[in-house]
Image (cartoon, grey):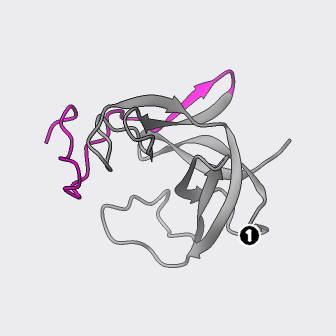
Amino acid sequence: MGPDEGAEAGSGQLTVAVEDAPVEVVDGAARLVAGRCVACGTAIFPLRARCTSCGGDVERVLLPSRGTLWTWTTQGFEPKPPYVADGDEFEEYGVGYVEFDGFLRVEGRLTRADALAIGMPMEVVAVERAGRTTYAFAPETG
């Protein structure tokens, strides 16, 4: 399936992401590249050419740079491939869902695995991992 193809409505098939980097830096703030279906209004992350709910066209939307930690946990063991470690030794890390103004919840890696609380303000940060720009969530700094 190519990037311009999507699922038939109700097929349950996923569509292909249309951008390499899920994050864009705008005026110094990292923002996630998401989408909204023009037909049914479904919020989609990462951005896809077709809606995963109805197969309709999707418009590009930049999420706010800040959200709220909805839930989180720690990853205490090394995941199976295709996971790429940051260094030679595995280090525990946090994973959580951040909610963006009731629009969408996005799962991502957390920059800290301690001092976190559900409901705390978080910000999107751009990070380099395995030679690619991706995102993580950090406790809001100001």
Residue 76: say if magenta.
no
Q: Tell me the quarter of the image containing the C terminus.
A: top right
Residue 12: say if magenta.
yes
Main secondary structure found in the magenta portion: loop
Q: Residue at x 44, y 36 (%)?
A: 35
The answer to whether one can see residue 44 in this image is: no
The location of residue 115, given as percent across then percent down, is 79, 68
User: Residue 58 is drawn in which quadrant?
Assistant: top left
The location of residue 55, given as percent across then percent down, is 26, 42
Please state which amino acid type lies under the numbered disc 1. Asp
Q: Tell me the quarter of the image containing the N terminus.
A: top left
The answer to whether one can see residue 42 in this image is: yes
Q: Residue at x 82, y 45 (%)?
A: 141
Q: Residues within 10 Å of mark 1 (few under 14, many from 20)?
A: few
* Nearer to the camera, 76 or 70: 70
Tell me the residue that label 1 is attached to. 114
The location of residue 125, given as percent across then percent down, is 63, 42
Q: Residue at x 18, y 36 (%)?
A: 5
Give the magenta range. 1-28
Q: Say whether residue 34 is left or right of residue 113.
A: left
Q: Residue at x 60, y 74 (%)?
A: 74
